[in-house]
Image: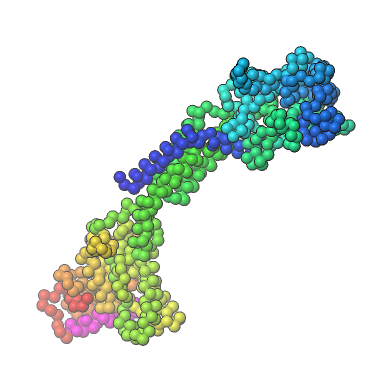
Amino acid sequence: MNLVGKQFYIALLSSIVGAVLTVFILNGALQRISIDVLNYFLASEKTSGEIVVVGIDDSSFSALDESVGRWPWPRWIHGDLVDILDQYGASQIIFDVIFSETSEEEMDLYFAEAIGRAQRVILASDLSEVQNDYISGIIESRPLPLFEEYGAEVGLAGVDMDADRVIRYHPYYPDYPNTLSSLGSKIEIGKIIPQSRILRYAGPDHTFPYLSYYQLFIEDGVPEGFLKDKIVLIGLDAKASADVQKSQQDSFPTPFTRFNARQTPGVEIHANLLDNLIQDNWVSNPPNSHKILIVIIMTIISVAVSASWRPTLTLLLGLGANICLSGFSFYFWTEGYYLNFLLGLPTFIISYVAAGGHAYLTEGRQKRQIKGAFGQYLSPAMVDTLIADPEKLKLGGERRKMTIMFCDVRGFTTISEALKDTPEKLTEIINILLTSLTKDVLECNGTIDKYMGDCIMAFWNAPLEDGKHACNAVEAARRMILTMERVNQELKDSGKSQFDLKIGVGLGTGYCVVGNMGSDQRFDYTVLGDVVNLSSRLEGQTKTYGMTAVLSSYTVDELEESNEEILDNIVEIDKIRVKGKKDPEIIFGLASEKISSDEKQCVKKYLQAFREGDLKKALSELDNLSNINKQMKDFSSLMKERITELQITGLPENWEGVYEATSK
């Protein structure tokens, strides 16, 4: 199995593990967190405006304890409160206080009569678990029957706490349909599926219009019209009273507690429940089948983005998918439907870490090897291509048509001798020169095979395939000719060298074997083939023809005719038999600038006369060539010397117009 296949299976298996963990282990925690976040950022835009909370708070205890005694207060004061609220025009009066025990008979009657006068009072009951020698089970603690006889309605005040004690859902009591909120809203809840309704909070604690209990007993304590037609909820909001906290828990953590560390009074929990029902503003908690479908979709996405490992791209795509899910979640929350935006995150994290670890141990190691092996010999873009797709790299020897280059510094021995007392200066000059020439090779998609002193060997069409390998190699040679002019000027301007450095470039094209060559202990990525030797020989002939670059006919044949810029700089210069080869080779010269048609015509006529053995006419055409442009002047001078020598020695027998090269 290749690396791509292994990467896919790692992503698939890790995503499945993440999905299983999400569904069976993490779902509850993720749901709690997401509901809290959604409530925090998307609290109800506004309340119904029908609810006022009257808090039995610390201020009320301070104000009333001296006059009425410590909690629980005598019930006559609650009776007075009902009368006052009735006078202020409250539409409903709801006590989140359980009056299940008798007090003084007169006080109980006083409170009951006030309830009877108002005829719109709702009292709280509660459920508790009892287990003793006589009874076990759930019993309801209801208010005194007296209060119900005088017209009080009774609703459960219990709330459903989540695993972390936070109130997130509407309470579910299948055998007790009446709750404070259902009676207050006059909406029949009925038997509903447990946790099918998520409580959508209006905000943190003390969001609803609020009065302290004692304010109703002082002059101007209640703004005019503040309670008119309002549902008034009365309940404990004590933080410091030890007596209250010993007898009854009066505050609970809500989704906002995660962010502000404050709890919300139980009476305000009921205010939120009531407001949800009045505005039909609660959020539906979908069945598990919906949630599993989301997990499956996010698992498929996690596999897709992690199967082909690109650290940054994979991370962006995975997070992007989860951000999109969050966007849908926030939107659907406003529409009353709960979508857990965290369902895909564990799967992606596990998949990303597993796929990244596998890639680091396998692909990462291979990529580091590739970068180490080719980083100094290929352009960064080519190295990145190999790293991205290592399958393009075939090691171990492969037959390919390639273009080979040899580039050598002319007169290096003379320069070395002149700088023998300052070898570090010679090294600096050569490094500057080779750096500039190497840049030209790499920018044209070439591969540096090796450096041999002052010589560069490079090739094209390996390790990456290059359909334009000959064009790119010739373009690199042309750039190198221009680079020499620039480097010479820079060295002179800086005072590092006063030598006029020159190079010779040989280019040949043909079939080679490319791959790792060497021993078990040490090997190089290099090429072998006849064209390698030919290219080296052609580089040696550059001084013979006065041309900076000499190309084989096979290289020129590979050039695209549409690339006129390169073809305009090339001219046929001879047919030679290089040392060590039997077959003659037609060779071409490459100039840095365009060779005019007149120059090409003169060279063509020269070659025709030379090959026919008409040395006099050949010499005449060379004279014409030298008078046209200095670009071919060196070539003309050297060819004149050759013809002069042949005029003295005479043409060999069976003359075919092939020059026998005696030097490398």
Residue at position x 38%, y 74% in the image: 431
Residue 10 in the image: above or below residue 380? above
Residue 610 in the image: above or below residue 345? below
Residue 257, percent from left and from top: 65, 38
Residue 662 figure quarter: bottom left
Residue 456 figure quarter: bottom left
Q: Which of 289 and 321 is in front in this view?
A: 289
Q: In which quadrant of the rendered image does the N terminus lie?
A: top left
Q: Residue furthest right?
A: 219
Residue at position x 56%, y 39% in the image: 327
One can see residue 182 in this view: no
Residue 218, percent from left and from top: 87, 31
Position of residue 646 in the picture relative to residue 179 (left or right) = left
| Figure colour scheme | rainbow
One can see residue 453 in this view: yes
Q: In which quadrant of the rendered image does the C terminus lie?
A: bottom left
Residue 79 figure quarter: top right
Q: What residue range appears in magenta?
A: 624-647
The reply to whether the magenta stretch includes residue 640 is: yes
Residue 629, percent from left and from top: 34, 78
Residue 370 in the image: above or below residue 433? above
Q: Which residue lies furthest to the top in this view?
A: 149
Residue at position x 19%, y 76% in the image: 661
Residue at position x 66%, y 42% in the image: 260
The reply to whether the magenta stretch includes residue 9 is: no
Position of residue 293 in the picture relative to residue 138 (left or right) = left
Q: Nearer the viewer, residue 591 or 296?
A: 296
Q: Which of 417 and 474 is in front in this view?
A: 417
Q: Residue furthest front?
A: 133
Residue 349, percent from left and from top: 47, 43
Position of residue 378 in the picture relative to residue 20 (left or right) = left
